[in-house]
Image (cartoon, grey):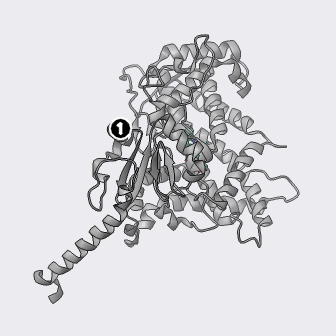
């Protein structure tokens, strides 16, 4: 007890403070290197954490960009971070210096989810053999899906019909479209991973989506703090509390994999990504280098749900909101649908080439909605140079995609919904280079072709069948996004009236 008296405590406190300051100085010394990007002065231990508004990060970073330029530095606790803004800097970093900038910062939280050298999933996998193997596998499975089986386009078209039926069942009454859109998009990923679609009221499906939603919410706030201070993960029970959603999700995926193994007919081609992966696990038996392990299958499937579900469904929620707010645009899209597709047959991807206005609207929804404003953090795997600044190995890179999608030098009306951004004077579809909602370079979103297909087919199917309006007596919803892990539109209701 004597140890805790004031007199004895003083030297201990001083020693701890000096130790912390020394560690802090050690972490900051990169800032003093020649040509290190400028940035706000960090305070000891917390760095710049208190100078950032985590509820409105793109806005916070936009202010710092105006002060320090396109390439600036931050200190997130002890993690050195460089923020890249504008087309030149982002393209130079991700494309020209892609070999140096495609790593991911370690996510301490995920160590508790079964991550290991041969099980790293795709999104957070370090830039190396396991990532390359899994990225190649996911890309080729997405591309080949449908050889001798139903094509992915067919899945999406059938799902769009189910989605329209669910909208019709609302019988013109006001409803929030987000839950149904989430189920439709969830079913497209399930067709890829589970080889089947679920009824919208199937309890297993509802649980899958619920747990996935919880996972997205949980990751937004606490994850950042825990990644900044991994030592907190040693607090008994905290890791399992934060990861309860992901863990439940893994249990559901585990059950799905077990079912696949039981029902797999080796004489038949793989039914879906899970079968194809299990075949690779068989082939890789005895190869200690391979990332085709059962633990990794769970992580890859979880990554596809995580990356592909909320991003796409939130974009569709934006699309319908913007149609409510811009009835003139909605009418022009419907006119184009009537002219090119008509009212009878369902839309196909081939129609897109003859529908410049609708294509421009879908792109403008993505630009305006700006759903993933800060992309997914990268990390330098060696010293590199961007726009004349030196960025040391191990620096986290934040790619400010929002700075491209809302760049005042590129877009005529960056902060307004204006489909003409994607049309030339003759009304032909054009895509400015700064349109980069899927990022660029080696880590470019691998689901882009699927997302493009879902956005076009779901959107045109819905507008072919329904006209959308603000329910009578309800105020006009706002188009100001709500910032979380993603940018979502504010909650709203609509009426879907059959055309
Ligand atoms: C509108 C929908 C979508 C948007 C806006 C979007 C956006 C992004 C962005 C910004 C990244 C980070 C790229 C980087 O690190 O530089 C990313 C990565 C990724 N996305 Fe998407 N995404 C969408 C849909 C999808 C879909 C449908 C899938 C698959 C089913 C998917 C799978 C992935 C994966 C696996 C990664 C990680 C790639 C890697 O680390 O190599 N995404 N996405």
Query: Which percent across, then down, holds residue 315?
Result: 52, 34
Between 218 and 31, the one lying in front of the other is 31
Between 240 and 356, the one lying in front of the other is 356
Q: Is residue 419 visible?
A: yes
Does 109 sit above or below residue 17? above
Does 119 sit above or below residue 156? below
Q: Quadrant of the C terminus?
A: top right
Q: Residue at x 42, y 49 (%)?
A: 82
Left or right placement of residue 266 versus residue 220 in this view: right
Q: Residue at x 71, y 60 (%)?
A: 259
Ligand 1, seen in the image, is in the quarter at: top right
Left or right placement of residue 106 versus residue 270 in this view: left
Question: Label 1 belongs to which residue?
Answer: 59
Does 266 sit above or below residue 7? above
Work out which residue is located at the far left of the displayed protein and give it. Answer: 7
Query: Which percent across, then down, holds residue 135?
Result: 67, 52
Query: Which percent across, then down, holds residue 350?
Result: 74, 25
Query: Quadrant location of residue 497?
Result: top right
Q: Quadrant of the N terminus?
A: bottom left
């Amino acid at each position: 007890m004597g140890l805790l008296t004031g007199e004895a405590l003083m030297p201990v406190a001083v020693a701890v403070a000096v130790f912390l300051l020394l560690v802090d100085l050690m972490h900051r010394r990169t800032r003093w290197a020649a040509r290190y990007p400028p940035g706000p002065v960090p305070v000891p231990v917390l760095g710049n954490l208190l100078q950032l508004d985590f509820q409105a990060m793109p806005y916070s970073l936009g202010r710092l960009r105006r002060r320090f330029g396109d390439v600036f530095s931050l200190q997130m606790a002890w993690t050195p971070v460089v923020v890249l803004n504008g087309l030149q800097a982002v393209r130079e970093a991700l494309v020209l210096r892609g070999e140096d900038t495609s790593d991911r910062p370690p996510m301490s939280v995920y160590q508790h989810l079964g991550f290991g050298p041969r099980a790293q999933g795709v999104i957070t996998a370090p830039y190396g053999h396991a990532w390359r193997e899994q990225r190649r596998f996911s890309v080729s499975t997405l591309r080949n899906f449908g050889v001798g089986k139903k094509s992915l386009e067919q899945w999406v078209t059938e799902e769009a019909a189910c989605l329209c039926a669910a909208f019709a069942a609302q019988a013109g009454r006001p409803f929030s479209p987000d839950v149904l859109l989430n189920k439709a998009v969830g079913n497209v990923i399930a067709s890829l991973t589970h080889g089947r679609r679920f009824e919208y009221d199937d309890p297993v499906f509802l649980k899958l989506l619920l747990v996935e939603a919880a996972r997205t919410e949980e990751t937004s706030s606490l994850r950042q703090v825990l990644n900044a201070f991994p030592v907190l993960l040693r607090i008994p029970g905290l890791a399992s509390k934060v990861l309860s959603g992901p863990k439940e999700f893994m249990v559901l995926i585990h059950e799905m994999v077990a079912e696949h193994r039981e029902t797999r007919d080796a004489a038949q081609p793989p039914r879906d990504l899970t079968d194809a992966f299990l075949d690779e696990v068989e082939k890789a038996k005895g190869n200690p280098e391979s990332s085709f392990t059962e633990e990794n299958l769970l992580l890859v499937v979880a990554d596809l749900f995580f990356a592909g579900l909320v991003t796409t469904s939130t974009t569709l929620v934006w699309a319908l909101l913007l149609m409510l707010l811009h009835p003139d645009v909605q009418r022009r899209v419907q006119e184009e649908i009537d002219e090119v597709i008509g009212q009878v047959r369902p839309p196909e991807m081939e129609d897109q080439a003859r529908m410049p206005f609708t294509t421009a609207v879908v792109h403008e929804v993505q630009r305006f909605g700006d759903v993933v404003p800060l992309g997914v953090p990268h990390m330098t795997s060696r010293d590199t140079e961007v726009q004349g600044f030196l960025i040391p190995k191990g620096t986290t890179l934040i790619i400010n995609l929002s700075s491209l999608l809302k760049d005042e030098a590129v877009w005529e009306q960056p902060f307004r919904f204006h489909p003409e951004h994607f049309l030339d004077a003759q009304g032909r579809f054009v895509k400015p280079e700064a349109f980069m909602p899927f990022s660029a370079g080696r880590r470019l979103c691998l689901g882009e072709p699927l997302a493009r297909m879902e956005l076009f087919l779901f959107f045109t199917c819905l507008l072919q069948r329904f006209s959308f309006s603000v329910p009578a007596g309800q105020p006009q919803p706002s188009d100001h996004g709500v910032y979380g892990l993603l940018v979502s539109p504010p909650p709203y209701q609509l009426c879907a009236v059959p055309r």
